[in-house]
Amino acid sequence: MMKLNLITFASSLATRESIFTDHHELLDAITEKYEVKYIFPEELDGKLPEGATMVLVGSGGVEEMVKANIDRLPPYVVLIADGLKNSLAASLEILSWMRLNDRHGRVLHGPVSFIMQGIDNYAAAHDAISKLHGKRVGVIGKPSGWLIASNVDYAAMHERWGIEMVDVPLDEVVTGYEAVADDAVQDITDEFINKAVGVKEPSRDEVVKAMRLYRSVKGIVERYRLDAFTLNCFDLIPTTRTTGCVALALLNQEGIPAGCEGDEQTLLTMLAVQAATGEMTFMSNPSRILDNAAHEMVFAHCTIAPAMTDRYIVRDHYESLSGVAVEGVFDPMDMTVVKCGGKGMERFFISKARLLECTTNPNMCRTQLHLRLDEPLDYFLERSIGNHHVIVKGNQVDKLIAVFKLLESHII
């Protein structure tokens, strides 16, 4: 049973017994699902206990009490109010004051089922964020020159997300690649080709080279104990004469979020999405808007985890017309488009989307998803968070909003 801490505020006119009696319907639902620890203001000592922590507003008249204890509360304050004993009115006043003082939070109010869904989302988000602590995130090679707005502040990420950013020289990839013999990758080459529904441009020799690069990058992941990484793949093409698309695809498939072009913000988005959903992700370019009014656009990139797709085709890399890429094919389904960014990953965009079809435009990267988003596309044209965005299967909006809000990001 998951732990849940409820910091409980009530006016001096209420006894502790009356709080449990007055709000028994909601509290009974909570205690059926969670191991609850009730914490009263006088018991706050500056360090919150283990587990998700939220605020139970037990009555009106607690506004000053919450204000006085605001620095002892979580950075993102979830106020639970069932509406009884003026709890909603007090919660709205508290939320308004917090917004005026640059503190972030929200009120959970409505039918008990709605409140419980919100509690579940934020409790799961807390659990996901705890998985990020201590992660080692590699930046292999410097970010590509065209990514002028996609890096992060390493110190800020350590403080806010609890992760360690690790720089790895790109030369180590080349050295590792040269040390891998063709014979060492024959089996995985066969497996990759045989599981595909087709092979278009690359020869078998090209796939062998791509697999040698995969082995090299995987060795670096193991040697540096990386939990995720981003690779400056374009700079490898002149020296290895292949592309990193397959290496990234297979490592994503193995549960190691792997991003292209040294894009740090998108990689960290991928890492957070995986922690929250347990799903593989697709890092993609917003490539073309097809219908602004209908919110339809194409996202494309040359690498995707084969296991994430319904089927895949072995292709060459679009920009360089060399190496090996992956054209993933999906049947229509619900998806989620998300991007968290900024130097401290302080803002994010998210939208549920419907995959309508996979297109095959020869002037775009190989995996092409024609999506209809719920959110207007003005975001991309007026306030986009960089270039690359992350796509995950299913409607993951509520889960991810909870995660990024607890990480002190605001929706853009």
Image: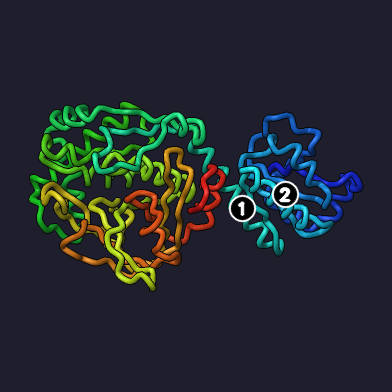
Left or right, 371 with reference to 142: right
Q: Residue at x 70, y 63 (%)?
A: 110
Q: Residue at x 61, y 40 (%)?
A: 75
Q: Residue at x 29, y 43 (%)?
A: 147
Residue 357, image x, y percentages: 30, 69
Q: Which residue is mark 1?
A: 120
Q: Is residue 187 visible?
A: no
Q: Depth check: 183 or 74 in front?
A: 74
- Numbered circle sitting on residue 277: none
Q: Is residue 123 visible?
A: yes
Look at label 2 and name its amino acid: Ile
Left or right, 222 with reference to 15: left
Report helix, strand or loop for mark 2: helix
Report helix, strand or loop for mark 1: helix
Q: Depth check: 377 or 9 in front?
A: 377
Residue 180, image quadrant: top left
Look at label 1 and name its amino acid: Asp
What is the crowding at mark 2: few (fewer than 14 residues within 10 Å), some, or many (at least 20)? many
Residue 351, image quadrant: bottom left
Q: Depth check: 359 or 235 in front?
A: 235
For the residues carrying marks 1 and 2, which lies nearer the camera in this image? Answer: 2
Residue 189, image x, y percentages: 17, 45
Q: Quadrant of the N terminus?
A: top right
Q: Distance between the Cα atoms at labels 1 and 2?
A: 22 Å
Q: Which residue is mark 2?
A: 94
Q: How is the image coloured?
A: rainbow
What is the crowding at mark 1: few (fewer than 14 residues within 10 Å), some, or many (at least 20)? some
Residue 326, image x, y percentages: 22, 53
Q: How many marks?
A: 2
Residue 277, image x, y percentages: 47, 51
Looking at marks 1 and 2 on the same chain, the residue that comes earlier in the sequence is marked by: 2
Q: Are marks 1 and 2 in contact (CB under 8 Å)?
A: no
